[in-house]
Amino acid sequence: MKRDPNCTLCPLHATAEYVCLLGQGPRKPQAMLIGEAPGQREDDSGRPFVGRAGMLLDTMLADAGLSRSDLYITNAVHCRPPGNRTPTKREIKACQHWLNYELATVKPKVVGILGGVALLATLGLKGITKIRGRPIERDGIVYLPMLHPSYILRRDCIDQPTGEQDFRTLKGIIDFGGVPEEQELNPTLVDTWAKVDQMIGAMHGVVSADIETTCLYPWAAEAKVVMLGVGTSSGEFDVPAAHKDSPWSQNDLAEIVERITAKLEDCFTVFQGGKFDCLWMRVHYGVEWHNDFDTLLAHYLIDENSHHDLEFLARLYFGAPNWDIPLEEKQGNTSLKVLGKYHAHDLFYTRRLYFKLKRELDKDPQVRRVFTKLLMPVSNLFVKMEERGCFIDADKMDNAEVYLRHEMAMAHKKLIRWGDINWASPKQVGELLYSKLKIKCPQKTKKGALSTSESTLNQINHPVVVDLIKFRGHKQQLSFFVEGWRPFIVNDRIHPSFKLHGTVTGRPSCTHPNFQQVPRDARIRSQIITSKGWELIEADLSQIEMRLAAESSHDPEMMQCFQFGIDIHWRTLMSSLESGAAYVDEVKKTVEVYCMQQGLSADGPSASILLKVWTENKGRSETQKLLEKWKTRPSSGISEEAEKNLLRALREYSEAVRTTSQKRKPQGREAIKFSDAMQLLSYIGPSRSIDILPDFWPEKRKLAKSQGFGFLFGMAAKKFVQYSRDSYGIIINEVEAQKGRKHFFSLYSSLEPWHRKQQRFAREHGFVRTFTGRKRRLPHAQDRDDTYERAEAWRQAINSPIQGTASDLNLMVLLQLAEEFPHVYPTITVHDSILVEVPTKDVERVVLRLEEIMKGPQLLKAFDIKFSVPICGEVKVGPWGSGVSLDKWRKHE
DNA sequence: TGCTGATGCGCG
DNA sequence: AAAGCGCGCATCAGCA
């Protein structure tokens, strides 16, 4: 192959080591592969595709049964662009001369186009991710657009299965000597009653079901089902619905749907993302379709890191051709024939995927159990949940809007004194602050821009930041939680959409709108209420992630806290105050006020007696009973009843000792020792202490709480410095933070060994599991080098099982509640809590039962899970975010 | 004009 | 030595 080392077609010749680096390969290659441009390594070695991308290429080739030695491999651009940037359009065009020369010389029958640059150079097309995998014939050559190995690496190998499939498709084309014939489906268009009978007759065993709609939101004005149908062992049936060419009237359709629905009861119905179809059928036809097997959810459990759309799965498992049609056509704006063909492909591949994915699930019984016992039931329940939606208080929304607009206007008025710019633009704000106002920028963004984030602003001592933060906050609340919600309101209700496959850990996610990010601010949150005759109930699992971390690590200190009902964050706080001898005044003050409230003097002897009595009582058997009760009151340090008894005993002791000691020691009062005060404070607990110093303890406890969550999951001291500063205005240096971190891990001494254990497991197996058996695949955990990715994967190995198990527990509670009370309506799940609408007359029953269920849902047995750490939850009645306990609710009722 | 990525911020 | 995890949405800016 000739090349021109003196080529000057484009400016690259000036910087490239090798000018005009042509491809390499045998005389009559099976196919030609075209990449992007030489990188540094290629430029040095004079060969295409070396380094990491080259290794990945070899792996994928081998996987497909191909070998580099049978292929001619070249690049679209033949000189290395400086700094490894992507070649520009001009460079691509300039180099096309050489590419054409190579194509003419090698004369390949099959060309693999690797990536967008090669696609542009060879076919002049854009959008590689959309058209990849589909062969294109031109001038007797079959071109296959494929993902570039570098792209796959850049995207963290999420698309590796897709890339691998591309190479299998390439192999198929080489072997077949052209594009393999597509499997021609022959769907039946159900347009006569005889064909309806035929369809019903064909429905038995495994049946796939699917619908096509005009849009995604079933309550939209234009929402219509355009086509519905079933896939059976004897073919696919398309029933035209709200289509211009449909022969069916509304009544006809109602009857057909009725017959399909009845027949599906006897079938094993499979869907791809069936929550969507079942919801639409409920809303538009009032029928209940049961989803027996969801191919999307099945694949989510098989590989949570990749995509789960039908096209992707069909191509991944079967090398299926692309049968997608433009969006408008899917929405009904095409002939019944075209739409029917598309729909039939959906039905065919959904059904086919069922058999494949069932086998895949069977390979891992633990994962299969999550699927059948948790995911599928929840998916069917979510249909009802989304259909119900959440009731919105229109008046509260109006009030919130007025308030937010006013506050925003006030803040903005103050802001424009500094400059009349777009205060919502980080760039413009940055210029104004750091150039015009000459404030020194304390922090840059990851990309190097001058940061204007709240965390950065907090470090600036300038009047402008106060108003800026206010302005931003109110603007965001307004656009998210008022204006953003209004378009979704239908008859005073909003129907958010939940994705059971929304996260890699197993938590559901929520969109349109996202009700899992509603501010805790009562003004916003209590916009969500329920209709007349009903009450809204929120049940949340208390400190569930902490409890599960205790369970997983078997940390004795943590376990003890939960077993004895001691507030874990209070414990953390006490311990850190103790070790640092910090906030002595506040500690003593709290104890003194407490003792005064109890009619005791807080002097040394009195306090030590209090301690002694408490400690002795803890050991007595009768106190054991009290301790049992503590378990149900995790929010306070000591139960009311226990406290009353102990205080009674104390007064007796105290009186006795005082009379004797006064005889012996008539001196004045002795100050309480810090260590005694600390110990007393531990017993007093957070809620009483907060009553005494409400400006001090809540913030301290919050900080300890965040310390807990941060350190528990691998946060470094440095970040904690930043965190305390940003969220609490507490300035500590890195040494202090490091000390705090060390102290945290010495208090909960089993945590670090537990971290190492999880990391070892991930490193050895490449995945970790939740208690329920869900897998979290962490390929980077097996990286040989100590990269950021590996450290990240190792932290995920600690977090995922906890987060995932907590979420699964929450779903178990939800399922059991729905099963026991079919007439209550779940409306939202938020990771460790559920919101339920309950008829007013049933509130008492449901609340009490929920408290029981949360201590241990039945499903745990089915999963062979037995916790030694007690689990419990808290239930509140009333508008979201301002609900009250059952006791308080009863009084108001 | 519509898409993508970055930034920023709400939640658990 | 250094290292929280998991989301969705509005907005802006740059690009084609």
Image (cartoon, coloured by chain):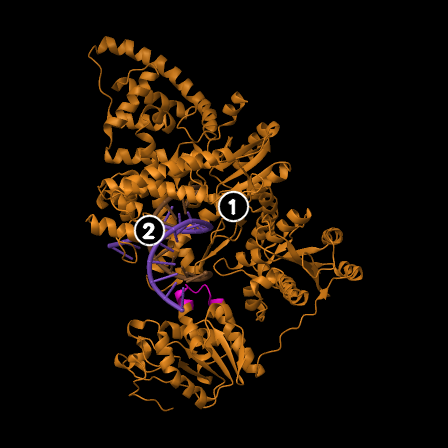
Chain colours: A orange, B brown, C purple
Q: Quadrant of the N terminus of chain A?
A: bottom left
Give me the disc on residue A487.
1
**Residue bearing mark 2:** A425
Q: Amino acid at mark 1?
A: Pro
> Would you say the residues marked 2 and 1 are in contact, meaning their CB atoms lie under 8 Å apart?
no
Q: Nearer the viewer, residue A459 or A687?
A: A459
Mark 2–mark 1 Cα distance, whole angstroms, equals 25 Å
Magenta run includes residue A799: no
What's drawn in magenta, residue-wise? Answer: A152-161
Q: Which is nearer the N-term, disc 2 or disc 1?
A: 2
Give me the disc on residue A796.
none
Task: Indicate left or right for A374 with A664 as reference.
Answer: right
- State the SS at label 2: loop
Which residue does the image show at 20% across and 47% down from the upper left?
A: A437
Task: Indicate left or right for A445 with A877 as reference.
Answer: left
* Residue closest to the far right: A194
Q: How many marks?
A: 2
- State the SS at label 1: helix
Which residue does the image show at 66% across and 49% down from the upper left?
A: A284
Q: Position of residue A843 (x, y in %)?
A: 58, 29
Decide: is A572 above or below A498.
above
Q: Nearer the viewer, residue A417 or A375?
A: A417
Q: Position of residue A426 (x, y in %)?
A: 31, 51
